Image (cartoon, rainbow, N blue to C red):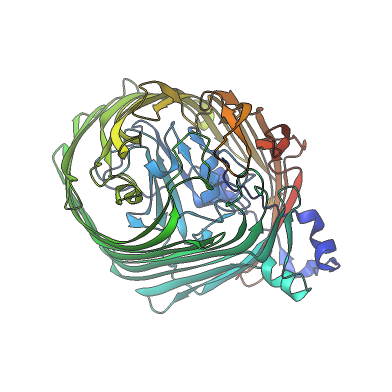
Amino acid sequence: MTVVKTTIFLCAIGVSTLLGVELEMIEVNSKAYQENDDAFEDIFKAPEYFETPQYVPAMPSQKRMSKEEAKFIPGGQGDPVKAIQALSGVTSLGDLSGELYIYGSKPEETLTTINHLPIGYLYHMGGLHSVIAPEAIEQIDAYLAGFDVTYGNAMGGVIDITPAYPKDDLSGFGHVGIYDASAGINVALSDEVGFYFGARRSYFDLLLGAVGKATGTLDEDTNTSYTEFPNYYDVTFIGSYIPNDNNIYSLELISADDALEISTFANEVKDPEANGEIKSHRGFTTVGLRHQSFYGDYESNTLLYYKYSTTRVKLFEGYFIDVDSHESGLYHQSSYTYDNHKFVVGLELQHLETPIDLNISELPPSGTPGFDFTTADKFRVKENIRANAVTFFVEDIYHLQPNIVIRPGLRFSYSDYKSYGGYVDPRLSLLYAPTPEDTFSFSTGLYTQAPNGVKTIEKLGNPEIGYERAMHYVLHYDRKLYRSGELSVDGFYKDYQDLVVDDNQSQYLNGGEGYAYGIDANYKLRYENYYAYAAYTYIRSKRQLNTSSRNLERFYGEVPHTLQLIGGMRLWHNWLFSTRMNYHSGAPYTKVLGTYTNPTDPTNRKLPIYDTPNSSRLPEYFSLNLKAAQQISFSGGSRFEWSFELMNVTNHENISGINYDDNYNEVGYYKQLPFLPWFDLTYYF
């Protein structure tokens, strides 16, 4: 009847009171530093992006950010990856949520990679901080629809992060923020060999333990306490060997870990078995050996990788989830330019082995309310998922004329898992630039994705289900305007087919349909010491939820209207001021219309009667964030950087959910972040 909901809120204002620590001002000797005319320069000049061989500028729904411009977007707390949520067409339903809804797609329908190196998850604790060190990031590319054949097993979108390779010097940094601290070092062992190593650790659990508050209350309203305060760490290592201008060899490693122990009794009446202790531990380590070559007309990217991820959860009385996943693979891509053609071909080999040990209930229905843990069927499952897959892709980027580009492509994949078999995804992109200032482009194609593996397990799911699919259609227009301004508009339509939906007989079947459509408009301007960004997105999305009804219901991640305004300016050479205004429609939810009692239920609980799934909306969301930052350069090349951010300056009451009492009467709201100051300090040497 209810899903356990825990609100974790870290407020900077109360830190000194909570820990009994007095904060003191630190005096800086003004003679030790010097003016820095280049401070924040990379934010205001046009970025120089790394261009992959398959990238074609002005193709539909392509968005990118450099590390520098992403770090200083207010609301991201200096985390470039969190700035993805500031891209138009990307929606997040909570201030502390890292789930990305791209053009009406589910978060799990989007692929996230480090230049094709897979990672276990993108954010700590669901959205507090990304797992990748900012200094290890070169740029972020987002493909929201209509992407090319070099990316697969995703019918929503792609987030691809380009790693930054070590510099040819000895340098490093130390960083302290509100809820974590980090440090990193770059070492040049020779002219050809270097490495970067960075680590981050949250520290609230350590400070609370030091002051005798190792256990305590997280949320009085939900009767939730902690026995291990939520904590995390991550490690990033990138080693490189660059013998000449034509070759880069690298070893890339990312490891992350998240843990918490809480006790909750919020559902003691509504869902009696969904109460008690929750112990959660998850983590992953991914490592890749990469070779990139650049020989004029020929370029290649070869990656050999291994990823280990683990999930350990203990729930309530005797229920648990133990999952280990071992994924290894080879990715190779070659491109060759001949005359007006650029041929791109590639091969992917993957092996997956996932031992699963579960004592848990059936899975909650997707996108619908009313799941009751107490009465749900429980299963003890012990199984080992093994799968092998091979993929081949090819495309031709053909410049028919200097202002006309055609990009046909084909992606073929085969898996030996269950009855999956093979599939072929054809894709096509067209570009026409009638003037140097105006560009039109169009992309379409088929996008195939394997369903969640848990849904293929006997008892919990249906071993006979197969691939889900979506057709993408995207039309794009952009125009270069006066003084480095740029306007772009994308219209998109996604047609979902063979969706895995709930079935009353077989648990799940490939019988679902759905769609998402909308428009995405952006304006960007960079001029001297100013930048501005305005974006509006309109999205509609519906999906079928069960084979028993052909009705399409509102998608739980559908947010029709989103408006964002971002601006920044540099003053006095070394000061940066920026602001971000974010408005969007409220998230969908399913309203409780009344209650009933089940005469066979010995608890005599009141059970909810729900309205049509996702037919109601929460109040509209609004936030205004302000940020100020300063760089102070010291003799010898080191520098100090601080930033101060005011989030939700207007203290607008943003709602994340409805709070019901034990009789399903509305008694209030679950709220998102109120007005909250945030700061960080970083020293670079």
Is residue 214 in view from this perspective? yes
**Residue 651, position as x, y percentages in the image:** 77, 38
Is residue 178 in view from this perspective? no
Q: Dividing the picture into quarters, in which one does residue 561 lie?
A: top right
**Residue 445, position as x, y percentages in the image:** 25, 31
Viewer-proximal residue, 654 or 626?
654
Count of marks placed on residues: 0
**In the rendered image of this protein, does residue 415 appear above or below residue 213?**
above
Viewer-proximal residue, 149 or 170?
149
Q: Is residue 260 left or right of residue 337?
A: right
| In the image, farthest residue toward the left | 338
**Residue 633, position as x, y percentages in the image:** 67, 64
**In the rendered image of this protein, does residue 539 appear above or below residue 295?**
above
Residue at 68% x, 42% y: name it.
672
| In the image, farthest residue toward the bottom | 189
Viewer-proximal residue, 437 or 144?
144
Viewer-proximal residue, 51 or 132?
132
Q: Dividing the picture into quarters, in which one does residue 354 lie?
A: bottom left
Q: Is residue 469 left or right of residue 489?
A: left
Residue at 72% x, 73% y: name it.
209
**In the rendered image of this protein, does residue 625 appear above or below residue 490?**
below
Quarter of the image where the N terminus is located:
top right
**Residue 476, position as x, y percentages in the image:** 37, 25
Quarter of the image where the C terminus is located:
bottom right
